Amino acid sequence: MCDDAMPALDLLKDYGWSHILLTNHIPELEPILDYLGLNQRFKEVFNSAWTGYEKPHPEAFRQILNRFDAETKVVWMIGDSFKADIRGAEAAGIRSILVRNVHPEARTSAANLMEAARILLDEHLRCEANV
């Protein structure tokens, strides 16, 4: 696990963010999340083994948007795969941050999850200032 996962998730939660996990097929996902202490940090977990769509298929992302659309104001995808996470999210109209990797087509990148969290908080403050 990345050392900054829990602090980044907790920081964003303190500012009112909710977290949803979308992952491609990992049969052992639930016990892994339990072992790492991450299960309680996610509002919901989506696994392609259960949904029938793997990232980068846009429907993998749309299923989540459809489920939470009425209560969600801002949606971002944070992921480390340009193809699966970033391209897939953007194909579904979701803004994204590429972490721990570099790709020339990534609009927003972060060296780690804490930097990604700071980008989200800065963006949120900019949006609120423009309201």
Image (spheres, rainbow, N blue to C red):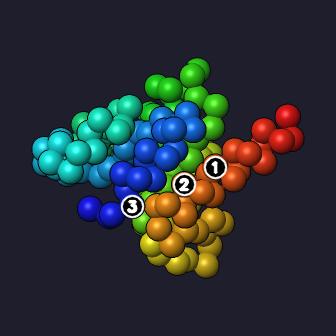
Q: Earlier in the sequence, mark 1 or mark 3?
A: 3
Measuring from the top left, give residue 117's x and y in whole percent. 54, 54
Which residue: 47% across, 67% down? 112
Tell me the crowding category of disc 2: few under 14, some 14 to 19, or many 20 or more residues within 10 angstroms, Cα based.
Answer: many
Amino acid found under the numbered disc labelled 3: Asp
Give yes or no for contact between labels 2 and 1 (Cβ–Cβ under 8 Å): yes
Tell me the crowding category of disc 3: few under 14, some 14 to 19, or many 20 or more residues within 10 angstroms, Cα based.
Answer: few
Q: Which residue is mark 3?
A: 4
Measuring from the top left, give residue 40's x and y in whole percent. 29, 35
Gap in angstroms between the C-alphas marked 2 and 1 = 6 Å
Q: Dot 3 lies on which element?
A: loop
Which residue: 55% across, 68% down? 110
Q: Is residue 58 left or right of residue 22?
A: right
Q: Dot 1 lies on which element?
A: helix
Q: Is residue 56 shown to the viewer in this render?
A: no
Measuring from the top left, give residue 68's x and y in whole percent. 50, 26
Q: Dot 2 lies on which element?
A: helix
Which residue: 39% across, 61% down? 4
Residue 121 - label: 1
Q: Which residue is mark 2?
A: 117
Amino acid found under the numbered disc labelled 1: Leu
Which residue: 74% across, 45% down? 125
